[in-house]
Amino acid sequence: MSITRLQLGALKKLEPKITKLRKDLGALDKGLIIMRDFKNKHKETLTRSKKIIPEDQIDYILQELSIIAKNDDVKIIQMKPVKEPQAKPVNGAVALRYAPLSINLDLVCDYHHLGKFINNLENAEILFAVESMRITRQENNYFQQKVSLVLKTYVKK
């Protein structure tokens, strides 16, 4: 009789651990379902390649930036593309097919629209990378910020 009491006592001690493990497995299953759904919804975004625009179509890049900014309620005060100087090619080296292009932007917007703008730049069909950003408050409107943003992209030579 004492052996069965010991076994029952041991089983009662295991019961909370089993309950916790079942809850953890349920949470894991839910997490896996969410991950699969996310992967299926964003499969095209994950596999989509970025465009690199020819050098003579820099205006197209600037136009796309303007469209994204307008859609995100970001006001562009100034937009200035700056071609970066190229290093002199070494004899026998392969010529580069792409040239870096920086785009200096002066913007006025609030934080939420700025975040949406940067997110849409990341998801744009053209390759953009935020190289630097400086945010300062506006004196006359505390809800709007001045943003100096430097984007980097590449163009085909």
Image: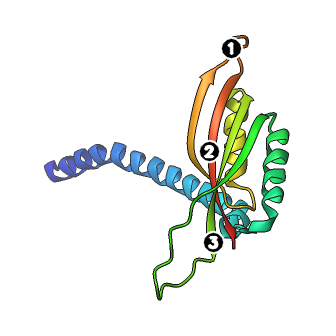
| Nearer-the-camera pick, 29 or 54 | 54
The residue drawn where x is 66% and y is 56% is: 128
The residue drawn where x is 40% and y is 51% is: 21
- Distance from label 2 to label 1 (Cα)? 23 Å
Residue 1 location, x and y as percent?
17, 50
Q: Nearer the viewer, mark 2 or mark 1?
A: 2
Residue 113 location, x and y as percent?
73, 33
Q: What's the residue type where badge 3 is placed?
A: Tyr
| Nearer-the-camera pick, 64 or 72 | 64
- Determine the image quadrant of residue 133: top right
- The image's mark for residue 150 is 2
- Distance from label 3 to label 2 (Cα)? 19 Å
How many C-alpha atoms fall within 10 Å of the one at disc 1: few (<14), some, or many (≥20)?
A: few
The residue drawn where x is 62% and y is 67% is: 99
| Nearer-the-camera pick, 121 or 32 | 121
Residue at disc 2, secondary structure: strand
Q: What's the residue type where badge 1 is placed?
A: Tyr
Classify the position of the C terminus by image quarter.
Answer: bottom right
- Distance from label 1 to label 3 (Cα)? 41 Å
Q: What's the residue type where badge 2 is placed?
A: Val
21 lies left or right of 40: left
Q: Which residue is mark 1?
A: 142
Residue at disc 1, secondary structure: loop
Direction left: furthest residue:
2
> Of label 1 and label 3, which has the lower sequence position?
3
Q: Which residue is mark 3?
A: 98
> Of label 2 and label 1, which has the lower sequence position?
1
How many C-alpha atoms fall within 10 Å of the one at disc 2: few (<14), some, or many (≥20)?
A: some
Residue 91 location, x and y as percent?
46, 85
The residue drawn where x is 47% and y is 47% is: 23
Residue at disc 3, secondary structure: strand
